[in-house]
Amino acid sequence: MSELRQALAEQLAEAVFQALTDDLARQERVLLVVSGGSTPVPFFKALAAKHLPWKQVDITLADERWVDEQSRDSNAKLVRENLLQGAAADANFVPLTTGDLTPEEGVEEVAKRAASLPWPASVVILGMGGDGHTASLFPDSPELTLALATDELLVAVRTPSQPQPRITFSADRLHQAKRHILHITGDEKRTVLANAMSGDDVRQLPIRAFLSCPLAIYWAP
């Protein structure tokens, strides 16, 4: 990994640490919503090393593939192996899957679980794909319109471009956070973001759903 990406991960971890610390001065528990993929791994490791009262921190994911938690495609597995380490293992992690065969069958149970979290989230950390998707809000998903409009917490999602069905927090629920951060790397994603900023068709580039709220952008080559 480049030194610039490592430095970015350290800066992001410090910003999240400060945000959680500030909120814990005013409330008993805080919620951190993170994203999966390879980009956040160094950030997870940097944040895990921070001296937080982890037993007062709830963590969940912006979205998840509907796979077994032992699958290499599981975002929950990624979080457990890279963030919930050392003292950070004391955090309360709430995964987004159940033992049901499909997300359509499990979404109600996951929503009940998620509803008990201390909303609004202190921080939502979003990623972005080369197609402009964020969380599991994909431009080719039949459920995109629903996920952008509903006030439900979670939506079961299927999309032709992805091999697994997914579950995602709705745009509305993700909007209901005190702070929003976009964490991306590479020139391709910088170009996608620039395109998103120059237009307003959310269905074409769903990341646009979050450009209207204050969004801190963390990018490195």
Image (cartoon, helix red, strand yellow):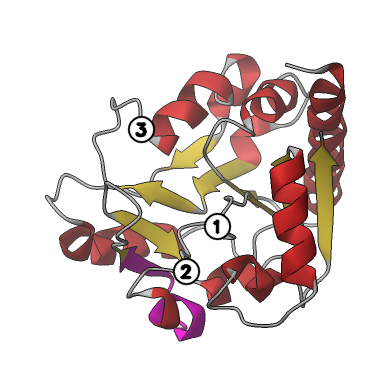
Q: In this figure, which residue is indicated by the disc labeled 3?
A: 73
Looking at the rendered image, the quarter that the C terminus falls into is top right
Asked whether 97 or 127 is in front, the reply is 127
> Is residue 55 shown left or right of residue 23?
left
Magenta stretch in the rendered image? 146-156
Quarter holding residue 207? bottom right
Q: Is residue 157 visible?
A: yes
Name the residue type under label 3. Answer: Asp
Q: Residue 148, percent across and down?
A: 50, 79
Asked whether 187 or 76 is in front, the reply is 187
The residue at 56%/77% (across/down) is 172
Q: Residue 188, percent across and down?
A: 70, 45
Q: In this figure, which residue is indicated by the disc labeled 2?
A: 139
Quarter holding residue 209? bottom right
Q: Are marks 1 and 2 in contact (CB under 8 Å)?
A: yes
SS category of the residue bearing label 1: loop
Asked whether 62 or 25 is in front, the reply is 62
Which comes sooner in the sequence, label 1 or label 2?
1
Q: In this figure, which residue is indicated by the disc labeled 1?
A: 131
> Is residue 190 shown left or right of residue 157?
right
Q: Residues within 10 Å of mark 2 (few under 14, many from 20)?
A: many
Q: Do the residues labelled 3 and 2 touch (CB within 8 Å)?
A: no
Q: Gap in Å between the C-alphas at discs 1 and 2?
A: 7 Å
Which comes sooner in the sequence, label 3 or label 2?
3
